[in-house]
Image (tube, rainbow, N blue to C red):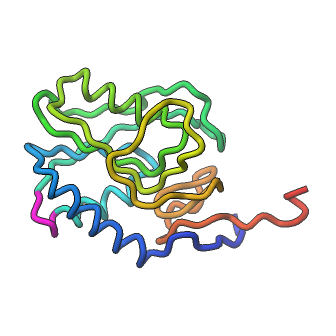
Amino acid sequence: MGRRVNVLFSAEAIAKRNADLAREIAALGTERLLVVAVLKGSFVFAADLIRALHAAGLAPEVEFISLSSYRDQTASTGAVRIVHDVDSDIAGRDVLLVDDILESGRTLAFAKDLMAARGARRVLSCVLLEKPHKRAVRIDADLVGFRCPDQFVVGYGMDVAHAYRELPFVGVVEVDADEAS
């Protein structure tokens, strides 16, 4: 896409926060922990967090679920659909949902309800970013990496039209003056 991206949260700040989050999760005393990464945006965060969980003394199993409420837009459509479901049995397990950003809350609420309905012993949620003033449903994440300003962010797995996922930091795409008007 060729546009400049201004760093909002550096790779170093994210790595430090991941280690802190992993220690917080370890202190919760989980049983048969299953990390469920919500794809696609959380894949980088989930990978780094899982390695941090290992360093904190945990050995979680890992699954993936792909949920969509955005499609190719920059704002949620409001309807959440399952694109790819988990394969593992959830019943009786502690599930840690890992997502990139808590904004409207629809996706996370849907995922938490789904895991609870499938018999999870406990469903916890961990998000890299939280935009607290954007909620459409009443939900809070159990663990939050960073509070995020009301800007569209990219990098560290998050994208716009499938671009910028590879960036090692979270940033904001610089908009040209011509585009802003």
User: x, y percentage for residue 178?
Assistant: 90, 62
Task: Look at 22% across and 65% down and name the residue there.
Answer: 51
> Which is more toward the observer, 161 or 52?
52
Can you name the residue that lies furthest to the bottom here?
12
Quadrant for residue 173, please give it.
Answer: bottom right
Q: Along the horizontal axis of the image, is 23 left or right of 166?
A: left
Number of numbered tags placed on the structure image: 0
Quadrant in which residue 140 is drawn? top left
Image quadrant where residue 33 sits: top left
Q: Position of residue 138 (x, y in %)?
A: 47, 31
Please state the extent of the stretch shown in magenta in the rendering.
54-58
Q: Considering the image in quadrants, where does the C terminus appear?
A: bottom right
- Residue furthest to the top: 117
Please tell me whether residue 25 is drawn above or below residue 173 in the rendered image. above
Q: Residue at x 39, y 54 (%)?
A: 144
Q: Is residue 129 left or right of residue 31?
A: right
Q: Is residue 111 above or below residue 6?
A: above
Query: Which residue: 32% across, 46% down?
Result: 142
Q: Quadrant of the N terminus?
A: bottom right
Residue 9 image offset from top left, x and y in percent: 51, 70
Front-most of residues 140 and 100: 140
Percent x, y of residue 168: 47, 71
Q: Is residue 106 above or below residue 95?
A: above
Magenta segment, prevailing SS (helix, strand or loop)? loop
| Residue 87 is a magenta residue | no
